């Protein structure tokens, strides 16, 4: 009896059916299916898509800042272009040094992305490592790591960042280090809570039975399960990171003049806020818009990466 050729799921129902198959044939198909389901959930959230669009626009503006900026961000004419109101030439007006505010905002987006990106790269892995190790090890290791975490959480983030920057000295690099040092405890707490639940599962018990070492269990089996929650928390914290960086810049402890950092631009325009309001209003609006976008994006990711919500 001749055997009929077996039609694959992809041929039978298309790519959508292959990705949403209840019985994936490989790990690759399962991973792609989860990612596709998360994207469908995320795309149904209109506010999250708005946030994603704004963040993508910010990235593109930062990448092509030299091509998009109509004027040099650090050069101006005190005699002819000082404190000009918004116009068709200078869309957002000029500052007290005659520099185009729009050009400075465009180049300042690079500093904003530098801060949030570097803080996320530094703080999230530290918090994830501390939290998973504490949650899985338990005992005195858990107590020691969590008491250290509690010490950092006992101080308001901005106050602690101010203390670190005051010790390290003003500058954007020191500001990033200070913000990262004050940001990791929240991720450690979250990762520990996730680990306490995961380590009691049959899945981890089976890995222990086959002889996997504790470090292998933490790095290969527990950390990947905690990553999605940490990513959501990092995205939601981006607004706070931007505000903290702007606060340090406003106080003169972050990026130093004439760098077009948004917080420093607000500090520069505070003495003109009543008459030449646009000097401080433009960077303030940029901070508000980007912070709102990250919050909307984080809300969408929280819904999309929730295993119970992905459909």
Image (tube, rainbow, N blue to C red):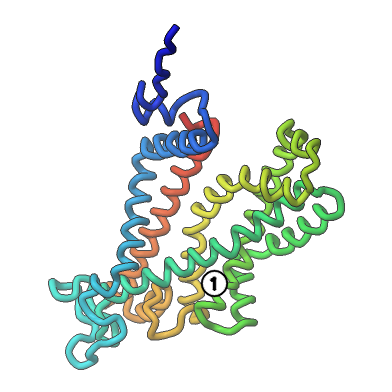
In the displayed structure, would residue 14 be above or below residue 78?
above
Judged left or right of residue 211, residue 266 is left
Q: Is residue 303 visible?
A: no
Report the side of 174 relative to 266 (left or right): right
Q: Residue at x 52, y 48 (%)?
A: 232
The residue labelled by disc 1 is 176
Considering the image in quadrants, where does the N terminus appear?
top left
For image coordinates 34% across by 67% down, the residue present is: 62
Q: State the residue in front, 93 or 147.
A: 147
For this view, does 16 lie left or right of residue 214?
left
Coordinates of residue 83 in the picture (x, y in percent): 24, 82
The residue sitting at 62% across, 82% down in the picture is 168
Residue 269 pos. (x, y %): 35, 78
Q: Out of 5 and 110, give the one closest to the viewer.
A: 5
Residue 176 figure quarter: bottom right
Q: In what element is the residue under mark 1?
A: helix
- Regarding residue 229, the answer to whether it shows in the image is yes
Q: Residue at x 74, y 42 (%)?
A: 196
Q: Residue furthest front?
A: 1
């Amino acid at each position: 009896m001749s055997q009929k050729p077996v039609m694959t799921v992809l041929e039978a129902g298309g790519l959508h059916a292959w990705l949403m198959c209840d019985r994936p044939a490989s790990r690759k198909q399962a991973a792609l299916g989860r990612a596709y389901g998360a994207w469908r959930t995320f795309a149904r959230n209109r506010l999250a898509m708005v946030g994603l669009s704004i963040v993508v626009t910010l990235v593109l503006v930062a990448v092509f800042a030299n091509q998009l900026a109509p004027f040099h961000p650090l050069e101006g004419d005190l005699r002819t272009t000082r404190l000009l109101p918004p116009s068709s030439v200078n869309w957002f007006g000029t500052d007290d040094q005659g520099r185009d505010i729009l050009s400075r905002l465009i180049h300042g987006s690079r500093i904003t992305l530098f801060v949030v990106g570097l803080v996320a790269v530094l703080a999230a892995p530290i918090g994830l490592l501390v939290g998973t190790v504490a949650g899985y090890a338990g005992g005195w290791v858990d107590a020691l790591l969590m008491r250290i975490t509690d010490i950092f959480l006992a101080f308001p983030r901005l106050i602690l960042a101010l203390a670190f920057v005051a010790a390290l000295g003003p500058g954007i690099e020191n500001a990033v280090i200070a913000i990262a040092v004050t940001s990791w405890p929240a991720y450690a707490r979250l990762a520990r809570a996730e680990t306490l639940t995961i380590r009691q599962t049959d899945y981890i018990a089976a890995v222990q039975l086959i002889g996997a070492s504790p470090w292998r269990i933490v790095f290969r089996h527990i950390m990947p399960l905690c990553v999605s929650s940490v990513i959501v928390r990092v995205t939601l914290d981006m607004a706070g990171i931007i505000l903290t960086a702007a606060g340090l810049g406003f106080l003169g402890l972050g990026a130093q003049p004439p760098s077009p950092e948004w917080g420093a631009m607000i500090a520069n325009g505070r003495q003109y806020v009543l008459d030449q309001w646009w000097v401080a209003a433009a960077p303030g609006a940029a901070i508000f818009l980007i912070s709102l976008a990250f919050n909307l994006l984080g809300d969408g990711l929280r819904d999309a990466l929730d295993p119970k919500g992905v459909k």
